[in-house]
Image (cartoon, rainbow, N blue to C red):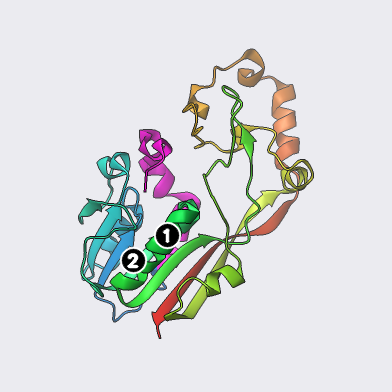
Amino acid sequence: MTLNPYYEVADLWEREKYLSGYERTRFQSAIQFIPQEATSLIDVGCGNGAFLSILEEQRPHTVLKGVEPSGAAIGQKLCHCEILQSDAGRLPFPDTSFDVVSSMEVLEHIPQRAMPGVLSELMRLSRRYILLGLPYCERRARIVCPECNCGFDPHLHLRSYDDEKVASLFPDFVERRREILYGKEFVVPFIAFRVLKVEASATRYPNVICPQCGWRLSQRKPDAAATSKTGGESLLRRIWNAQPHLRVARHLHVLFERA
C-alpha cells in the first residue's frame, strides 16, 4: 500500500497535538478498555507513539510494540518501546503474537482496496482482543485550500463508522465493550456545514495540511484585519464564542474478543 505524502509532513506529528486536550482524553479513555490480564499489546498505525507513551506510564508491565508506515512519525516518536516501520497489510509477526491488537483512528484512513488485508492482519496477530478507535457517525467536513483550491477532508478520513459497519469488521470476534466520546460544536458552523456541504474556512482546523500542495495554517500571511487588536474584532470574537454549543458524537472505542 502506497503511503500518502501527507503523512510524511513533520508538522503533522507535533508533540503538543497528541499529549494534551481532547487527544489525551481520547487515549486515556481507550486505555480503560484494555483487560487487566493482557500482558502484551501491539498498536498498529501508532503514529508517533503517543498512545503507547501513555500506556508506558500506566501499564509499565505490559510488553508494548508499535507499527507505523510513516518515517516522519517514527522520527518524532514519543514512546520508549520499538516502533517498526511497516505496512499494516503485511505485519512481520507470527500468528496470535499479542494479547491485544489496537488500532486507534487508523481504519478510516485505509484505502478500500487495502481494507481486507489490514483487517485480516489485525485478526491474525490477536491472541484474544482487538481494540479500535473509530470516527463514529461522522459527517465529514470538506474544506478548500486557499492556495491551490484543492477540496479535501482536513483529517483525510475516507469513511466513518456506524453500528452496522462496526459489527461487520471481524467475523471471528464478538464485541465486548464500547464507549462513544462526545465533543462540543458551535451551532452556527454545525448548521452551516449541513446546508453548504463545505466548510467556509480552513482556519477552523489549526493542524490542517493540504494533501495536494502542503499548505498549512502556519504559512498563512497575516493581514491587518486579522492581526488588528481593535475593540471591534474583540467584540466579534466575544459574540462568536457566546453562541450555544451542541453535544456531538465524535469517536467510538470498541473492544472485540475472539469468539
Earlier along the polypeptide chain: callout 2 or callout 1? Answer: 1
Please tell me whether residue 27 is drawn above or below residue 211 in the rendered image. Answer: below
Residue 249 at x, y percent in the picture: 63, 61
> Of residues 23 and 252, which is closer to you in this image?
252
Residue 123 at x, y percent in the picture: 36, 72
Mark 1, residue position: 104
Magenta-span inclusion, residue 17: yes
> Closer to us: mark 2 or mark 1?
2
Which quadrant of the view contains residue 182? bottom right
At 36% from the left and 37% from the top, the residue drawn is 8
Magenta span: helix, strand or loop, mainly?
helix
Separation of marks 2 and 1 at Cα, in angstroms: 15 Å
Residue 48 at x, y percent in the picture: 32, 48
The magenta region covers 1-30
At 72% from the left and 48% from the top, the residue drawn is 190
Q: State whether residue 106 appears in this view.
A: no
Which quadrant of the view contains residue 204? top right
Circle 1: residue type: Met
Mark 2, residue position: 121
Circle 2: residue type: Glu
Please tell me whether residue 80 is drawn above or below residue 224 in the rendered image. Answer: below
